Image (tube, rainbow, N blue to C red):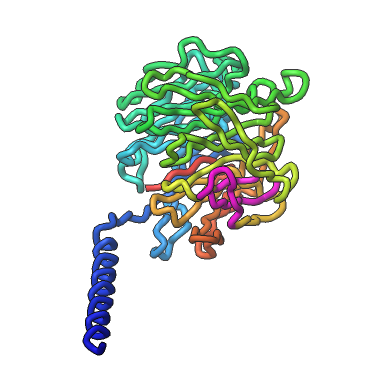
């Protein structure tokens, strides 16, 4: 009997040793992700007098200057103001930053801008482009070949239909997709790609021209997601929501075998699960439980597809969901940034431990009907398994930290 107990004890000890060894080995084998040290912020002067600019911020958590501006690079003339700096995209090699001007079209200016950020301490402006068939630049997707896709929400004059512009690795415009765009409210804003599935989705948000005082009446919101053949850049089907909800963003769920996506209705407070293959949408969460009329806007997901982050602009909040079960997302944390804070653009670091938030959406000033100013702060939230808390060490306020005066921070990228 005693020998059996000794033997059993030895077996347990061996198994535990093997488990400890394998756990340590897995940690050794796991690739280390180097934390980004630089934060790029694409911004515009609130008074629209000083040039639009790219700010470089110290993003090294171990630096005494963490959160401090390193330099700003003004956009050169012609057309260096009134572009309304919007979204950005960083090339896979981290050398090129592409930036969009949402309202450049109103001044007849170029609206896609490229910066060389190979040396992040001293970025250089490279070139600008003006796709002839489309305008109102929004979301960027950096392709493996070094080029970019850009959703252009409107036509050349800001009406509809819009396009998806494509730039090659030399930053030359090669096409505006699709060749014959649909006429049923094709105003793409959100963009998400799963190249391994040959799948791309875009979300239609609003007809841009209807946001201007020059166009009588209210805003013409859209409520649809387009499913694309990524390689051929063609639309396969349209997923139409029950109402024009203002689907400003869309995110394919990483690793999801059913190739589903999320979109949110900015005007109806709903989170929708999109079945890209059947072309259907299912309401899976009601944002009014957090803040009625809170404007759920931009979305980001972790690479395992198990967490979803969404900014709520008017509510002044950012929500973190557990999406382990895509059909029943669970709220893990509601980060409250305060009344009139206006969070909009969000971005995750590579290691998914920090979420950057900029407090500014869009103010068309005297030209338009949209006047969502926000407080111009840039936040870093620390991400853990079940929590999202502000990093007290990172303090950046574009009302007082920009030498040319209060500015509107929008798109961000890190390297």
Residue appearing at x 43%, y 53% in the figure: 352
Q: How many marks?
A: 0
Residue 407 visible in this rendered orientation of the protein: no
Q: Residue furthest right?
A: 217
Q: Nearer the viewer, residue 113 or 32?
A: 32
Q: In this rendering, would 240 be left or right of 168?
A: right
Residue extending furthest top?
A: 180
In the figure, is residue 374 to the left or right of 200? right
- Looking at the rendering, which quadrant does residue 144 occupy? top left
Say if 73 sits above or below 210 in the image.
Answer: below
Which segment did they paint magenta?
A: 309-332
Placement of 68 over or under 369, stated as above or below:
below
Of the pair 118 and 414, the residue shown nearer to us: 414
Identify the residue shown where x is 39% and y is 36%. 97
Residue occupying image coordinates x 42% and y 55%: 59
Q: Quadrant of residue 409?
A: top right
- The quarter in which the N terminus is drawn is bottom left
Look at the image and say whether residue 328 sits in the magenta stretch. Answer: yes
Measured as percent of width and height from the top left, residue 204 is found at: 59, 26
Res. 4 visible in picture: yes
Q: Is residue 317 magenta?
A: yes
> In the current view of this chain or complex, which residue is farthest to the front?
1
Residue 51 in percent (x, y) is at 52, 35
Where's residue 166, x and y in %?
Answer: 40, 22
Front residue (pair 345, 32): 32
308 with respect to 64 (left or right): right
Q: Position of residue 236 (x, y in %)?
A: 48, 19
- The residue drawn where x is 74% and y is 42% is 293
């Amino acid at each position: 009997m005693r020998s059996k107990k000794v033997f059993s004890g030895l077996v347990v000890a061996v198994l535990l040793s093997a488990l400890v060894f394998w756990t340590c080995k897995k940690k050794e084998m796991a690739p280390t992700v180097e934390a980004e040290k630089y934060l790029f912020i694409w911004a515009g002067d609130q008074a629209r007098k000083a040039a639009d600019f790219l700010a470089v911020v110290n993003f090294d958590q171990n630096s005494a200057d963490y959160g401090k501006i390193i330099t700003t690079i003004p956009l050169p003339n012609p057309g260096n103001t009134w572009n309304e700096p919007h979204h950005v995209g960083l090339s896979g090699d981290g050398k090129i930053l592409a930036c969009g001007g949402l309202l450049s079209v109103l001044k007849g200016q170029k609206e896609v801008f490229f910066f060389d950020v190979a040396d992040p301490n001293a970025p250089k402006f490279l070139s600008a482009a003006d796709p002839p068939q489309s305008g109102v630049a929004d979301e960027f997707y950096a392709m493996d070949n070094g080029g970019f896709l850009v959703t252009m929400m409107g036509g050349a004059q800001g009406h509809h239909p819009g396009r998806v512009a494509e730039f090659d690795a030399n930053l030359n415009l090669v096409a505006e997709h699709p060749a014959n765009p649909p006429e049923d409210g094709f105003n793409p804003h959100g963009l998400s790609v799963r190249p391994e599935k040959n799948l791309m989705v875009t979300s239609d948000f609003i007809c841009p021209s209807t946001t201007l005082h020059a166009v009588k009446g209210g805003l013409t919101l859209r409520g649809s997601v387009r499913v694309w053949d990524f390689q051929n850049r063609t639309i396969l089907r349209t997923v139409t929501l029950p109402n024009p909800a203002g689907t400003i963003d869309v995110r394919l769920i990483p690793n999801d075998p059913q190739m589903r996506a999320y979109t949110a209705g900015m005007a109806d407070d709903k989170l929708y699960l999109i079945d890209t293959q059947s072309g259907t949408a299912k309401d899976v969460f009601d944002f009014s439980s957090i803040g009625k009329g809170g404007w759920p806007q931009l979305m980001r997901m972790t690479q395992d597809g198990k967490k979803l982050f969404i900014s709520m602009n008017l509510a002044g909040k950012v929500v973190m969901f557990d999406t382990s079960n895509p059909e029943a997302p669970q709220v893990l944390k509601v980060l409250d940034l305060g009344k009139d804070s206006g969070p909009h653009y969000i971005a995750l670091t590579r290691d998914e431990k920090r979420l950057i938030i900029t407090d500014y959406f869009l103010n068309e000033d005297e030209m338009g009907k949209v006047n969502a100013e926000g407080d111009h702060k840039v936040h870093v939230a620390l991400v853990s398994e079940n929590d999202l808390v502000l990093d007290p060490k990172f303090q950046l306020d574009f009302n007082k930290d920009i030498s040319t005066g209060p500015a509107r921070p929008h798109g961000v990228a890190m390297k």
